[in-house]
Amino acid sequence: MVSAKPGKTIAKAASGSDAGSWSDAEFRWDDALAELAGASTDVLNLGAVCADRQVALGQGEHVALRWLGRQSERRDVTYHQLSDQSGRVARVLADLGLQPGETVAVLMGRVPELYSAALGIWKAGGIYCPLFAAFGPGPIKARLELGGARILITTDELYARKVAMSRPGLSRLQHVLVVGESFADGCGDFRALVNACLPLSPVATKPDAPAFLHFTSGTTGTPKGVLHPHRAVLAHLVTGRKVFGLSASDVFWCTADPGWVTSTAYGLIAPLVCGATLIADEAELEPRRWYGILHDEKVTAWYTTPTAIRTMMRYGAALARSYRENTLRVAASVGEPLNAEAVLWGQKALGVPFLDTWWQTETGAITIANAPGEGSRSGSMGRPLPGVEAVIMRCEGGTPNRIDAVDGVGELAIRTCWPSMFSGALGEEPRYGECFRDGWYFTGDLVRRDADGFFWFVGRADDMIKCGALQIGPFEVEACLMDHPAVAEIGVVGKPDMLVREVPVAFVSLNPGFEAGDALRAELLSYARQELGAGMAPREIHFVEELPKTNSGKIMRRVLKAKAVGEPEGGDILVSLPPCPGRYDDE
Ligand code: WT7
């Protein structure tokens, strides 16, 4: 798709505009289905297409997964081995009585077993539900309950720190399989069980059978479980090729945390279904290590986040340039807006621009993107992929109207149904239907489109806090702190941050008998960290006499946001538009 160095044909992408086009009149999702499913298009199993299919295509000895451990360990897993191991995991799960359509929760960092577990769950017909290891015991317990998981696969260390204390209250959770050395009461040895059995043939799942479940922040106190079908893999195949140009000759590295849908879609499914080698790095963001991996592992396609890019920028271009002799063909970013400066920095420091891509948990795969050879515009989200129809809608008098004017702002809406469209919203079922109207899915993002059809991000239509990779629902943070006896009322909002875009900060009014001050502030902060995990906990706590409210008693987040940044109250912080089709609480 794109020629490799030298010459890097995508260099022009960084120079501003290139009005190439995604449009592909021949494009049909059904062709992708026929390619993956063959003649029997009523059977599609994600586990089978990610591993067994590659073996059948003669790729069995090709490296599917290269795992890099924290202590410089290195392990290669071939497609054949992945197929075999995931088949065994499927057998273990079936032997535990897993029924097709049942959820299996997975709480693990990037360890080799994560990958065979996911594929094994799919082969057994189960729903793969990864959880963020950074969460504290509270959010993990809530997600295990909501997902109705009877089986959890985790590590000994994470079990001890995050689950053991909640286990007595988790009545549905019957089996915990642990990867590691020490096995607490009521836990099975994952590796021993997998080694002791024979592979199970993949269950003949229908394309629309549920396959993965990610929790994202909902608009209520409970997280929302976003469900996707096996069919979603069609979008991962197509975007893997169209955005990243993936094939068997690629080494693809996606840095996302396993709890995030980005990791399921691009840290796992897309590279495998395209037959590439995926890099799984156990360690966290550390620029020197990252440059080393890009260089030593000969990474050809890289998918990361603006937070990571900004961190690398902080380390300076000189360090980056010492790694300029790399094999990168394409680098892309997702999760928040990527400013033009960061796009160009990629070009300068690494020899390829960072291409911004847009999607969300609900869309299941990249929906709008800049891409090599297809046109890109620095600072924009890009243009809709083939097979995706995206428009801008605005509510006037409660009815959504399409905005076709150049630079008109409104809510981004996508025509149903693309293959990776979410098929359910656990915990917010009534609201699932409210996201759709007249054959359009409303994304909750405010955008504008320029004359060449590039979309530009304007803001969220709701109150979600975008903190690096995490999308934090203020409601879940509020619900947790409300459990502290001192807290009478609380409002949590995002405060702009240079590195991670936004951090959660809390405004708290106190119950009688509690005194505002540093001691209580420290106690509340530590309580929140303990319960929610450091990523989700507020970074600041401000005591207020009373929270600003509307007549109908809703907290006025706009006023709190103004306070958080020290602006006059009611300052015009966000573009404020009536969201369509009225699924967000108004102020
Ligand atoms: C929200 C989705 C990111 C994919 C994985 C799931 C914001 C995402 C961009 C971008 C500006 C972006 C949107 C979106 N977002 N990509 N390129 N530019 N904003 O992510 O946790 O469901 O978050 O992230 O607001 O709705 P998520």
Image (cartoon, rainbow, N blue to C red):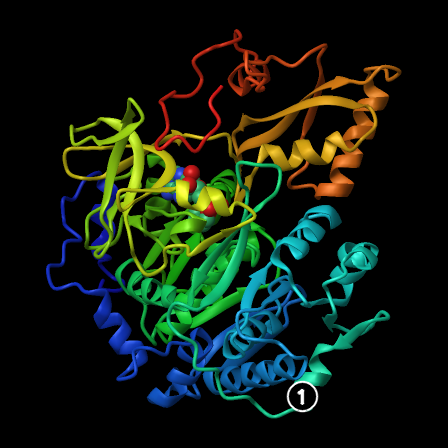
Residue 10, image x, y percentages:
23, 53
Q: Which residue is mark 1?
A: 195
Estimate how packed mark 1 is, as few (under 14), some (14 to 19) or many (20 or more) residues with alpha carbons within 10 Å.
few
> Horizontal and vertical percent for residue 477?
66, 35
Residue drawn at (57%, 36%), measured in percent from left and top?
220
**Closest to the observer, 419 or 250:** 419
Type of residue at label 1?
Asn
Who is closer to the viewer here, 416 or 378? 416
Q: Is residue 393 above or below residue 199?
A: above
- Please tell me which residue is depicted at 74% across the width and 39% down the height of the picture: 529
Where's residue 118, x and y in %?
54, 71
Of residues 417 and 47, the one drawn nearer to the viewer in this rendering: 417
Q: In this rendering, would 482 be left or right of 67?
A: right
Q: Is residue 317 visible?
A: no
From the image, which quarter does the N terminus lie in? bottom left
Q: Residue furthest left?
A: 25
> Does the rendering let one see residue 23?
yes
Q: Residue at x 25, y 35 (%)?
A: 392
Whether 193 is drawn above or below 417: the answer is: below
Q: Quadrant of ligand 1?
A: top left
SS for callout 1: helix
Relative to residue 303, is residue 531 depicted above or below? above
Left or right: where 34 falls relative to 345: left
Q: Quadrant of residue 537?
A: top right
